[in-house]
Amino acid sequence: MIQLQNTALHASHIDLGAKMVSFAQWEMPITYSSLMEEHHAVRKNAGIFDVSHMAVFDFNGGDQIGFFEKIFANDIKKIANENKALYGVLLNEDGGILDDLIIYHANDKFRLVSNCSTREQNFNWYNKHAVDFGVEVIERKDMGILAIQGPEAMNKILAMNEISSLVENLEPFGCMFSDDHLYARTGYTGEDGLELIVPNDIIVNLWEKALAEGCTPIGLGARDTLRLEAGLNLYGNDMTIDNHPYESNLAWTIDMKDEARDFIGKNALLKVDRGVSQKIIGVLLKDRGVLRPGYEIIHEQGKGIILSGTYSPTLEASIGLARVDQGHGGKGQVMIRNKILNIDFVFPRFLRQGKIQS
């Protein structure tokens, strides 16, 4: 039996009455009160998430720019002279997506955060290529991550005197180091907010300060409904190693402007027809029911499959992301429990910054 790992906030979650579940070999809170209450707290006020199960890596010495130019499909030079974060993907030689991640750069330091389920794979991948650039890869198991998200998130954070002066001028996707602590105006909810990557020995204090300022604790359940409303991909559901970025709504993360830059997977992508036969699209269920991963879709010109699906508390309807054949004509049908139900195909971003996208 696999021993589940705990974050530094495990006892705090138990004290708050969280329902704990196994997630990628970690014991994590899925809800504290109810998914609906937690979801609306983030959309209307501010919520705080423990996402310390995510993998954090630092880098030391060598040619770090050259290293990231090689392994990252986006161009790290975009942030090399700025205090910024950059989202993108790791690709294998065939152009398949190994993972999606964010690289932070501030104070001449790089820090990378990626998914927990790909931790070992990524660590080995970084080390395999880092040796060519003289770069040391350091997994920061001593670090935890808090995400404070929502329209009132920055007001709550500015009331936390310990960090207010550090983050008050951060713009979206801006970041900064204070000693070894990283503060970034990033998130995974479609709302404004901050992510704090800090040592585990201070994370409980910051968590308690945020709760005292009125932030609602949020579990993984609402994290998923929030990210899906925002149309944000989840690795393992919406894309895997068997998918390339052009069929995963991630063409914008592929930077080929520098023709001399030879990143891993570039040659494979150059051979891909960017007018792909399938793409990820949003799905809105018009009848009663809830979309779930694996449900089959049919439409006039082909078929598809639900990748992620849930009930949207904000839209009060079931929504999903699906990989669908082109030429769908805007409407289709899905099979749920032996019933054929009607769906609309929509832009794969249902909501952003609290506003429903039409």
Image (tube, rainbow, N blue to C red):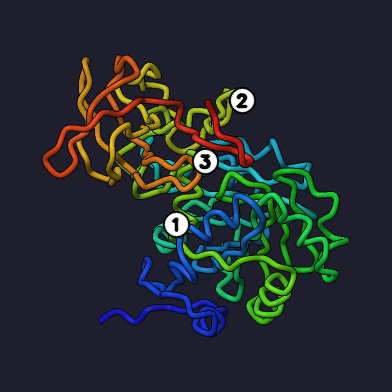
Q: Secondary structure at mark 1?
A: helix
Residue 214's spot in the image, x, y percent? 70, 67
Task: Give the residue number, with chain letter if any, for mark 2.
Answer: 258
Disc number lying in front (2 or 1) = 1
* 221 relative position to 159: left or right: left
Q: Amino acid at mark 2?
A: Asp
Q: Residue at x 68, y 77 (%)?
A: 208
Marks 3 and 2 sit apart, C-alpha to C-alpha, by: 31 Å
Front-most of residues 13 and 67: 13
Q: Quadrant of residue 243?
A: top left
Which residue in the protein does label 1 denote?
122
Q: Nearer the viewer, mark 3 or mark 2?
A: 3
Secondary element at tag 2: loop
Q: Are marks 3 and 2 in contact (CB under 8 Å)?
A: no
- Cβ–Cβ below 8 Å for labels 3 and 1? no
Furthest toward the right, the residue is 165
Disc sitting over residue 230 in the figure: 3
How busy is the neighbourhood of tag 1: few (under 14 within 10 Å), some, or many (20 plus)?
Answer: some
Mark 3 or mark 1, whichever is nearer to me: 3
- Camera-nearest residue between 124 and 203: 203
- Residue type marked 1: Asn
Residues at marks 2 and 1, CA–CA distance in whole angstroms: 25 Å
Q: Amino acid at mark 3?
A: Ala
Q: Position of residue 85 (x, y in %)?
A: 67, 46
The answer to whether 289 appears left or right of 270 in the picture is left
Q: From where the camera sits, is residue 268 visible?
A: no
Q: Which of the 4 image quarters holds residue 348?
A: top left
Bin the neighbour count of mark 2 within 10 Å (Cα to Cα): few under 14, some 14-19, many 20 and up. Answer: few
Query: Is residue 85 depicted above or below 347 in this figure?
Result: below
Q: Earlier in the sequence, mark 3 or mark 1?
A: 1
